Amino acid sequence: MDRLSSTTLLPDALQGTRDDISEQLGVVWSQIKAPVIVPLMSIAVAVCLAMSLMLFFERVYMGIVIVLVKLFGRKPDKRYKWEPMKDDVELGNSAYPMVLVQIPMYNEKEVYQLSIGAACGLSWPSDRIIIQVLDDSTDPTIKDLVELECQRWASKGINIKYEIRDNRNGYKAGALKEGMKHSYVKHCDYVAIFDADFQPEPDFLWRTVPFLVHNPEIALVQARWKFVNSDECLMTRMQEMSLDYHFTVEQEVGSSTYAFFGFNGTAGVWRIAALNEAGGWKDRTTVEDMDLAVRASLKGWKFVYLGTLKVKNELPSTLKAYRYQQHRWSCGPANLFRKMVMEIVRNKKVSLWKKVHVIYSFFIVRKLVAHIVTFVFYCVVLPATVLVPEIEVPRWGAVYIPTIITILNAVGTPRSLHLMVFWILFENVMSLHRTKATFIGLLEAGRVNEWVVTEKLGDALKVKAATKAPKKPRFKIGER
């Protein structure tokens, strides 16, 4: 068959129109390129390089600090007084502080049994602990199941309270705030918080509460997360790499140097007096945990991070669930920064150095610049320079800095070093979503208070893993 020409496929009129449009666009481009495009691109490159340097120095600084922490063994029990809780013959169990354990949940059909069971399995004098299940479920069937589970544990002698409310105002923050209003909470000294998919080990309280008992200046003890489904798929492996850096480096550095870091909203124990002094839970943003942490820090309270204490939990295993989670985690901090920056500046209880750390390092670099530069520079500006050869990006900005930042991030998860290329691609894809959420938070746009509970699979993960056919060993490189 003879090859069809373009004139066969398109009428002469349309062909001519297309050529005219292309020619006109070329003329317009040549006219605006030198006076408009080149200056704008130059400014964009300069701004992006400045942000890259900010992120680079922050990562290198934290890398140096974490190496020094490891070399000199600045463990929490060396920096603060810690000794195991001891029995008192005269006082009996009253020698132990009263601990409240809160489990906020919302339609958690897959994981409610796991979380309630783990909380009820915590080792602590039975008359000195209260398990509080804060159920905001809207599905009547799930509410009945959760209530029955609480009754089942109550029949075993566990002091467990099933609390509901007639609205979901404030979402998680509203539920936690409402939970603190009950009369029995007045007798509690500390409150441990676990999201519905978290499963603490029985010795969790024995390892955390002594820090609060023996150090009256400490408000929060935060544990690390351990992901039970990190090997489920490539997406969960990528999430593990990002979160491992957060816990291995960011939280550790904050705890070791400034005694401040963002509360992760779960797997932590608060001193109730500090929580109340800071103003309690507020629902003005979707990061109520970070909000409380910043306010408590401005009151002079200190935080401790225990990297050796790990609490099992679940990563989002679908892209939809992960996107909603990342929207909340990116939009919330930006919106909180907008609301609190002047409050931090005017604060007189903390040092200037700590205020600089919170504003510049914690908020600007990690919560704003990190998202914006990843998308704008690597996904927009650098590709656009191909069309504008007059713009030259220095090699250190386009290659060396991104490479070092990537390596520093990947060191937190050594077992996934071979997945760095996939991690870079994954982070660049998500950077558009995070950048959009960041600007929504800064500008308080329409979705600023959007809260979608992250879907959890719980026991379904075990069933899924059990039903997988055993993998046959592969010997052919081609199949890989």
Image (tube, rainbow, N blue to C red):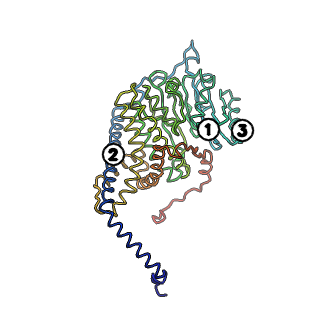
Circle 2 sits on which residue? 56
- Residue at left offset 71%, top offset 35%: 148
Label 3 and label 2: CA atoms lie apart by 51 Å
Residue at mark 1 = 105
- Say which element carries label 1: strand
Mark 1 or mark 3, which is nearer the start of the sequence? Answer: 1
Name the residue that disc number 3 marks. 144
Image location (x, y in percent) of residue 72: 34, 32
Q: Is residue 222 above or below residue 349?
A: below
Circle 1: residue type: Met
Instruction: Please name whichever residue, 475 or 103, is drawn nearer the observer in this view of the structure.
Output: 103
Image vertical order of residue 383 relative to residue 13, above or below: above
Residue 427, which numbered label? none
- Mark 1 touches mark 2? (CB < 8 Å): no
Image height check: is 111 above or below 392? above
Taking depth in this image into account, of 353 and 75 the one nearest to the observer is 353
